[in-house]
Amino acid sequence: MIGRALAVALCAIAIRTGALPAQQPTITNAIGMEFVLISPGTMLVGRFQPECPRPAPRVASRDRATDPARWTAADYARCEEMAKRDAMPGFTVTISRSYYIGKYEVTQAEWRRVMGTNPSVFQGSKVRGNGERHPVDNVTWADAQAFVRRLNVMDRTATYRLPTEFEWEYAARAGSTAEPSWDEIRQSAWQQDVDLGTTHPVGGKKPNGWGLYDTLGNVWEWVSDFYNERLFATPTQPTSGTTHVLKGGSFVSDVKNATWSTHAGGPGSGFDVGFRVVREVR
């Protein structure tokens, strides 16, 4: 009895002071979906600082527009003018609450367990290896929301939803303040420079610094926000619109799109679109 009384007293103190027990760094739900805890913090979003290419050793070329070695002083002056005009300083985003986010993109097996079907283009004989471990593809934003609704019915111990664009990018960046290099993208993403054929099993590439896989490449990922019809996200996201935001690029994306800051509008190609899920911290 003494032990139980002490536990109750400590719990009461924790509730009053806000010092609740620490959340587990990872968690697995009843259908086997794995989640990683993301702690609060800040990041810089929408920074764009274009640079003009510097002259390389002169090479034979008939296209002056694509050969910096053949640019004139006027060409460089014009380039610098355009770069300065288009540059954006970005803005700071604060993530004020912890949340769990899927360690992997939602797989075909997980989709089947929740929805009873598999809409994916890349399944069965169209993929190599275990198709059930490939991300579900060919899903609309409405499909992803339907999955979340049914998952909430199946697992009443938690609340699930799509991430916001800022939650997605914050988790994908894992503390990085710069865009990934080409080498980093190739190490962590199934994308155009690596393979043009199909999706790949989740978790086959290098994870990011916080243990998330395939935030770049494999399939584009839906988030909850409406698309603002602009090149980058804005500090205040729109509350209505006709399309929603896609993040992260896919297996047919080039290195320009397979990066954290890419702000694309769906529905995209369909066959290379999936998503990952947030589980709220209680």
Image: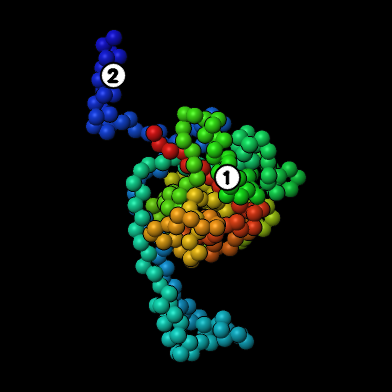
Badge 1 amino acid: Ala
Residue 85 lies, in percent from the top left, at 41, 78
Residue 263 lies, in percent from the top left, at 50, 60
Residue found 26% across the figure and 11% down from its top: 2
Residue 39 left/right relative to 239:
left
Indicate whether 42 appears above or below 278: below
Colour pattern: rainbow
In the rendered image, is residue 191 in sight?
no
| Mark 2 crowd level (few <14, some 14–19, many ≥20, 10 Å Cα) | few
For the residues bearing labels 1 and 2, Cβ distance under 8 angstroms: no
Q: Mark 2 falls on what kind of element? A: helix
Of residues 50 and 121, the one drawn nearer to the viewer in this rendering: 121
Q: Label 2: which residue?
A: 8
Q: Mark 1 falls on what kind of element? A: helix
Gap in angstroms between the C-alphas marked 1 and 2: 41 Å
Badge 2 amino acid: Val
Residue 2 left/right relative to 36:
left
Toward the front, the furthest residue is 240
Which of the numbered marks, if any, corresponds to residue 144? 1
Residue 87 lies, in percent from the top left, at 40, 72
